[in-house]
Amino acid sequence: MAGLNTKEFTESNFETEVLSASEPVLVDFWAEWCMPCKALGPTIDELATEYAGKVKVGKVNTDKNQSLSARYGISSIPTVLLFQDGQIKQKFVGLRSKQDLKMSIDQLLSA
């Protein structure tokens, strides 16, 4: 389901790939059965391509990584978290537009 530049984050690589990353990281919490998640998928892949080299973009399958979902209080999906320096800087719950996500990413990059 993920695009070429979209990473898969799991319980085993989350610390390294997300929390210890030197660049901002956008994390999409999703599941196979979630229709809004599937609708958001192409947008996440487009962002991964557009921000390649500047922002790390990836997905967490909530069914396969339940402890990560619990750790970050994910109660509905899709939920997109924007991390910087291991901290959550922005949280989006539900289907959001590409423009909403881009605006938050651009704000982080210009800060």
Image (cartoon, grey):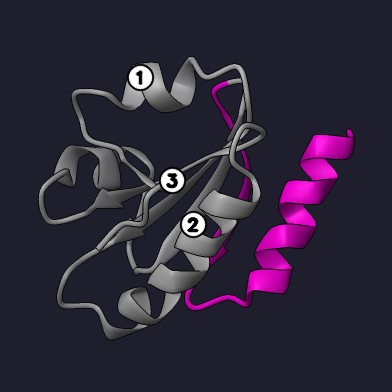
Q: Position of residue 36 (x, y in %)?
A: 36, 82
Q: Amino acid at mark 1?
A: Glu
Which residue is pictured at 22% across the width and 35% down the height? 10
Q: Residues within 10 Å of mark 1 (few under 14, many from 20)?
A: few
Q: Amino acid at mark 3?
A: Asn
Q: Which mark's residue is nearer the viewer, 3 or 1? A: 3
Q: Residues within 10 Å of mark 3 (few under 14, many from 20)?
A: some
Q: Which residues are magenta?
A: 86-111
Q: Is residue 101 above or below residue 90?
A: below
Q: CA distance from mark 3 to mark 1?
A: 19 Å
Q: Amino acid at mark 2?
A: Val
Quadrant position of the N terminus in the picture:
bottom left
Task: Give the mark nearest the N terminus, 2 or 3.
Answer: 3
- Compared across the picture, whether 30 is left or right of 103 comes to left
Task: Read off the residue under disc 2.
Answer: 80
Find numbered disc 2 in the image and state the secondary structure of the residue it sits on: strand
Q: Position of residue 40 (x, y in %)?
A: 44, 74
- Compared across the picture, whether 64 is left or right of 70 comes to left
Task: Read off the residue under disc 1.
Answer: 15
Q: Residues within 10 Å of mark 2 (few under 14, many from 20)?
A: many
Q: Position of residue 78 (x, y in %)?
A: 39, 68
Front residue of 42 and 92: 42
Task: Read off the residue under disc 3.
Answer: 5
Q: CA distance from mark 2 to mark 1?
A: 17 Å
Which residue is pictured at 16% across the width and 43% down the height? 65
- Compared across the picture, whether 2 is left or right of 6 comes to left
Which residue is pictured at 75% across the width and 54% down the height? 104
